[in-house]
Every structure is written in structure tokens, then in C-alpha cells.
Image (spheres, rainbow, N blue to C red):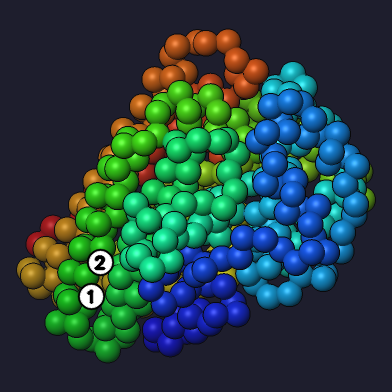
């Protein structure tokens, strides 16, 4: 049964990579010379936004042919660059200076490339995290203190730390991911002992993910995230947005399009844990999370949906009623609940508490809402509660 899931370990599908999970190994930093305009504008977005020159530069950009991109690394780097360019274009002048359209030179390649990748033309989790990292020292280990990012929406150490902490969480997830797959096969084979072994490895990987998340505070000041990064992660067309009706993508449609901004809900990692462990949320929360899958690369979404169709680890644990099996399964849920608890602490520190300051800025429309458009704390608390409720009595 796990063979269907293991099929997603195909390097060209950009689904799952050995040792990296959903993170792209050794992503490219620059596109070939034909795409130099994208290379330059993505690299200089932050400085040109500060001088209010960026939007004019994008308006003058050549309309390049996205079909000249070769291979998944080039395509994902191009999507990252176009999404960085798009975020700068839309939000350069704050809430009161937003455009109504995205120019054809940006809209057409951004939208068509998004179609090709199964993603959306907006800056997403997959852009900012999965294809946006490199080692500081190629000869040193793949670990948090040896990571940096390729592109960002704000300068300085804090924004880099936000990206690299999230990259490292995704990498730590690999052992959980592969053991979810092997755990599904253990269920299909009616092998209790093998499933116990898989669940212990999932539980250990989750603990490592929590430890990395706890390091968020080390180098990311709340002001840096809330005032400098967060505005550029916002989408358009969600409730309370400064662009409530969405944006027109010139050359694509005459009607405005709505896009959800970058959000942890777009992480294939946490959704895989939910589905793999059989955690089911309330209908409205589940609908939101499933909508977020449309912002993942297509193979990630397909993998999660294949996992949903696979033999259920949770049902197997309930049916067998073996104390050791139930105990380690519940430990996996407790660690997932702990991850969500700490995520709530992070959100409170970096968003909710900053919103209480009621400081006047150019980007006041976000307030306490998530960049993905959800009411942050009620949403996060409810999905944490359903995680806890999924525990099985021995």
C-alpha cells in the first residue's frame, strides 16, 4: 500500500526528497541570463521598495517567456522570484497605495507558471521556504546555524532567521514523513510491532521540530516580523483586506482574482501529520485547510490526498487496542499538540501582542488576522483542541 506514496519520491515530480522531505535540495540561486531582469528585480526588491522605485521598474519589465524555464529547480526559483516581485509591486505603498491590476509583463508568466506547478500567483509558504535556502558553508552540516535564504521581503538577520527556522523544521520532518509512509504499509500488513517502531520515530521527529520552533525567538524581534515582513506576506481578496475584491492579472482575466497570502496552513508538513495520524478538524476548519492545499506544489497536494485514501493508522490503533501501540500513538498526538501550542505562543508574541499597540502604519489592514485570512487565535486553538481530542483511550 505504501508504494503509491513512495512513488512521490521522484526527483522530477518535486514531491518528496530523500533526507529533505518537501524542501527542494540545493535550490538554484539565479536563473539563466535570459531571465536576468527577474534575477535583478527579485534581488533588489527590498531596496527599491524603500525608495518607492520598485513598481515603476516592474512596469518597465520585459515580458519574458516562462516556457524557456527548464526543470523543476528553474521553475520553482522563477516562481519564488516572481512572487517576491509581485509582493513588492502590490505592497510598495502600503494599504492606501495598492494597485488594481498586475501588469501583463508580470501577470502572464507568474500566472502561467503557477498553473504549470499547480500553485497560485501569490507569495506562498512553498515559495518563501521550500526553494529559498542554501548552506552558509557548503562543507558544514545541514543544520539551522549553517542556513541562510536566497531572497526575502525584508533585510537584516531577523527575516533570514524566520525563513531558516522554518526550513529546518521542514527538514526535521523527514523522519516523520518516511515513517508515516512505512506505518501505512505496516497497517496494510497487519504488523503491530512495525507500526509501533514507525510511531516512535514519528514521535522523535516531532520533538525535534518543536525544539527548532522554540528557537524562533533567538534572532527574530517581534517588530521586525510584524511591521517589516508580515505586510508582504498578505494576499488579496480576503475579508478585511486592503484589496477586498482582488487584483486583475492583465492578459489573463478582466475580472479581479482573490489570492490567500502566505500561511503556515500551506505547509505540507503539518497537513501530512494530521492526515497520517487521522486528526480530523471541524468542517469549516477542514475546508480552510483543504483550500490551502491549492497553494502547495501539485505533487504535495496529490501526496496528501493519496495518504488520505490509504489504510488508516488511527483506525488500526483503535481496532487492535494494544497498550504499547496506543501509548506511542498518543505520544505522537501530544507532540503535535505541543507544536501547535508553541505556534500559538509565537503568534501571540509576533502578531496579537503587536496588534494591541495600535500603532499607525501603512499596513493596518492585517491587524490580528492571519496573512491567510483566518482569525488567528480562535482558529489555532480549535485545531489544537481537535488534535488533543483525537487521542485514543487504552
Q: Which mark is residue 198?
A: 1
Whether residue 310 is situated above or below residue 120 in the rendered picture: below
Whether residue 67 is situated above or below residue 146 in the rendered picture: below
Rendered residue at 43%/19% (across/down): 354
Of residue 297 and residue 239, the one placed in the foreground of this image is 297
Compute the Cα span from label 1 to label 2. Answer: 6 Å
In the rendering, at what x and y percent does residue 133 appear?
Answer: 51, 57
In the rendering, at what x and y percent does residue 335 appear?
Answer: 22, 53
Kindly indicate whether the residue at mark 2 contacts the one at mark 1 (C-beta within 8 angstroms).
yes
Q: In this view, does 37 lie to the left or right of 380?
A: right
Label 2: which residue? Answer: 202
Q: Considering the image in quadrants, where does the C terminus appear?
A: bottom left
Rendered residue at 25%/66% (across/down): 202
Label 1 Cα crowd, 10 Å radius (few <14 / some 14-19 / many 20+): many
Label 1's element?
Answer: helix
Rendered residue at 83%/49% (across/down): 106
Whether residue 353 is situated above or below residue 6 in the rendered picture: above
Q: In this view, does 163 lie to the left or right of 155?
A: left
Label 2 Cα crowd, 10 Å radius (few <14 / some 14-19 / many 20+): many
Amino acid at each position: 500500500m505504501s508504494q503509491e506514496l513512495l512513488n512521490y519520491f521522484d526527483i522530477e515530480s518535486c514531491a518528496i526528497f530523500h533526507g529533505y522531505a518537501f524542501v527542494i535540495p540545493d535550490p538554484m540561486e539565479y536563473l539563466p541570463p535570459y531571465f536576468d531582469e527577474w534575477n535583478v528585480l527579485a534581488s533588489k526588491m527590498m531596496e527599491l521598495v524603500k525608495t518607492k522605485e520598485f513598481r515603476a521598474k516592474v512596469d518597465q519589465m520585459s515580458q519574458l517567456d516562462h516556457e524557456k524555464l527548464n526543470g523543476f529547480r528553474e521553475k520553482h526559483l522563477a516562481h519564488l522570484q516572481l512572487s517576491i516581485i509581485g509582493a513588492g509591486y502590490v505592497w510598495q505603498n502600503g494599504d492606501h497605495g495598492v494597485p488594481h491590476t498586475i501588469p501583463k509583463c508580470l501577470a502572464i508568466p507568474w500566472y502561467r507558471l503557477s498553473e504549470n506547478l499547480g500553485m497560485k500567483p501569490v507569495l506562498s509558504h512553498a515559495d518563501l521556504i521550500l526553494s529559498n535556502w542554501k548552506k552558509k558553508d557548503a562543507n558544514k552540516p545541514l543544520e539551522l546555524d549553517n542556513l541562510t535564504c536566497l531572497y526575502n521581503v525584508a533585510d537584516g538577520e531577523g527575516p533570514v532567521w524566520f525563513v531558516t527556522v522554518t526550513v529546518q523544521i521542514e527538514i526535521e520532518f523527514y523522519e516523520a514523513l518516511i515513517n508515516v509512509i512505512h506505518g501505512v504499509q505496516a497497517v496494510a500488513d497487519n504488523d503491530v510491532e512495525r507500526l509501533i517502531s514507525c510511531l516512535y520515530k514519528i514521535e522523535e521527529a516531532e520533538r525535534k521540530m518543536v525544539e527548532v520552533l522554540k528557537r524562533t525567538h533567538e534572532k527574530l524581534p517581534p517588530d521586525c516580523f510584524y511591521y517589516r515582513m508580515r505586510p508582504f506576506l498578505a494576499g488579496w481578496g480576503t475579508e478585511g483586506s486592503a484589496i477586498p475584491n482582488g487584483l486583475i492579472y492583465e492578459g489573463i482575466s478582466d475580472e479581479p482574482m482573490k489570492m490567500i497570502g502566505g500561511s503556515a496552513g500551506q505547509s505540507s508538513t503539518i497537513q501530512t501529520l494530521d492526515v497520517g495520524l487521522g486528526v480530523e478538524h471541524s468542517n469549516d476548519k477542514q475546508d480552510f485547510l483543504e483550500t490551502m492545499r491549492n497553494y502547495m506544489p501539485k505533487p504535495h497536494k496529490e501526496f496528501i490526498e493519496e495518504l488520505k485514501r490509504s489504510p488508516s493508522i488511527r483506525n488500526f490503533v483503535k481496532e487492535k487496542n494494544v497498550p504499547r501501540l496506543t501509548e506511542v500513538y498518543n505520544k505522537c498526538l501530544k507532540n503535535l499538540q505541543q507544536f501547535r501550542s508553541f505556534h500559538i505562543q509565537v503568534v501571540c508574541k509576533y502578531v496579537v501582542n503587536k496588534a494591541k499597540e495600535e500603532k499607525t502604519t501603512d499596513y493596518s489592514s492585517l491587524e490580528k488576522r492571519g496573512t491567510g485570512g483566518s482569525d488567528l487565535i480562535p482558529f489555532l486553538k480549535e485545531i489544537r483542541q481537535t488534535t488533543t481530542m483525537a487521542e485514543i483511550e487504552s
